[in-house]
Amino acid sequence: MRKLFFTSLLLLIPTLICAAEIPFWQRPTVCKLDTTTCYPSIYGAGYESGMWDTSAKCWGLKLICPEALTTEERYPVPMEKNDISKGKNISSDFDTNVLNNDCFGVRKTSSDGSKAYIDGQIVNVWCMGVLPQTPDAEVANGEIISASKQPSCKELADYGYAAVLNKNCYGKYYDMSKYLIQCNEDDLMPERIIILNGAMDYSSKGDFPVDKQEATSLFNKMYEVSKAQHEKYFE
């Protein structure tokens, strides 16, 4: 009997050694995480892996960025999946599926980044330094301000700017010695942008030079008009 007992122990020792080398979550005697309710990975930026999600019954809470929350927070807040899916204390202006450095929550924008959401409304993203008012927030391509505080055409024109798309933000500068930005009451978009030598004017819906060839063509037209005016003056 004693011999049989020692033989059983000898057979068991290799099994215990092998089991010790296998991570506990991969051992067949331990229940694995349910990937339908748990995050595929809770290790890395954006997660608090040591916290238990009571609603999803999983380890790992998602860290939501403070700016994406409607509560006043200074640091990322770990939240359960159920609360995140319900949008609890989360601003609808933010996408909490996108990682933002060490937490989740990036302001929603258009595909080219020229529009962004603020207070539930989509507004222009203004190029840096264009807004005459203090902006409410900054995004990747510039600054934004709430829909109720958008600048008028005249407010922009006073500084030589027009609400024209400038690559991936709004606010194109026009040298006031060469252009006149003509506004219509308090409209945001200019009614016309006039080249002061009279060669040509553009409506706000017209086309602007987008490359060297178009700019050269415009310059040639301006030159011909100027030349004709000069010859007429000295007739």
Image (cartoon, rainbow, N blue to C red):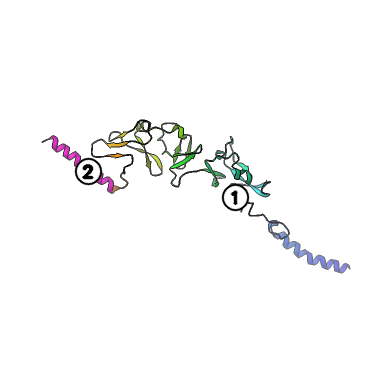
**Horizontal and vertical percent for residue 109?**
47, 44
Sooner in the amino-acid sequence: mark 1 or mark 2: 1
**Horizontal and vertical percent for residue 211?**
31, 47
- SS of the residue under disc 1: loop
User: What is the magenta range?
Assistant: 213-233
- SS of the residue under disc 2: helix
Residue at 16%, 37% (x, y): give it: 230
Residue 225: quadrant of the picture: top left
Eyeballing the image, is 72 above or below 106?
A: above
Q: Nearer the viewer, residue 53 or 73?
A: 53
Q: Is residue 121 magenta?
A: no
Q: Nearer the viewer, mark 1 or mark 2?
A: 2
Q: Is residue 219 magenta?
A: yes
Q: Which residue is mark 2?
A: 221
Horizontal arrangement in the rendering, residue 82 relative to residue 189 (left or right): right
Residue at 47%, 41% (x, y): give it: 116
Query: Residue 150 — which label?
Result: none
Q: Which residue is mark 1?
A: 44
Eyeballing the image, is 93 above or below 9?
A: above
Rounded to the nearest angstrom, the CA distance separating label 1 from label 2 is: 60 Å
Eyeballing the image, is 121 above or below 47?
A: above
How busy is the neighbourhood of tag 2: few (under 14 within 10 Å), some, or many (20 plus)?
some
Residue type at mark 1 is Gly
**Horizontal and vertical percent for residue 30?**
72, 57
Residue at 73%, 61% (x, y): give it: 19
Horizontal arrangement in the rendering, residue 97 relative to residue 124 (left or right): right
Horizontal arrangement in the rendering, residue 34 relative to residue 15 (left or right): left
Residue type at mark 2 is Lys
- Residue furthest to the left in view is 235
Residue at 43%, 33% (x, y): give it: 150
Q: Nearer the viewer, residue 178 or 183?
A: 183
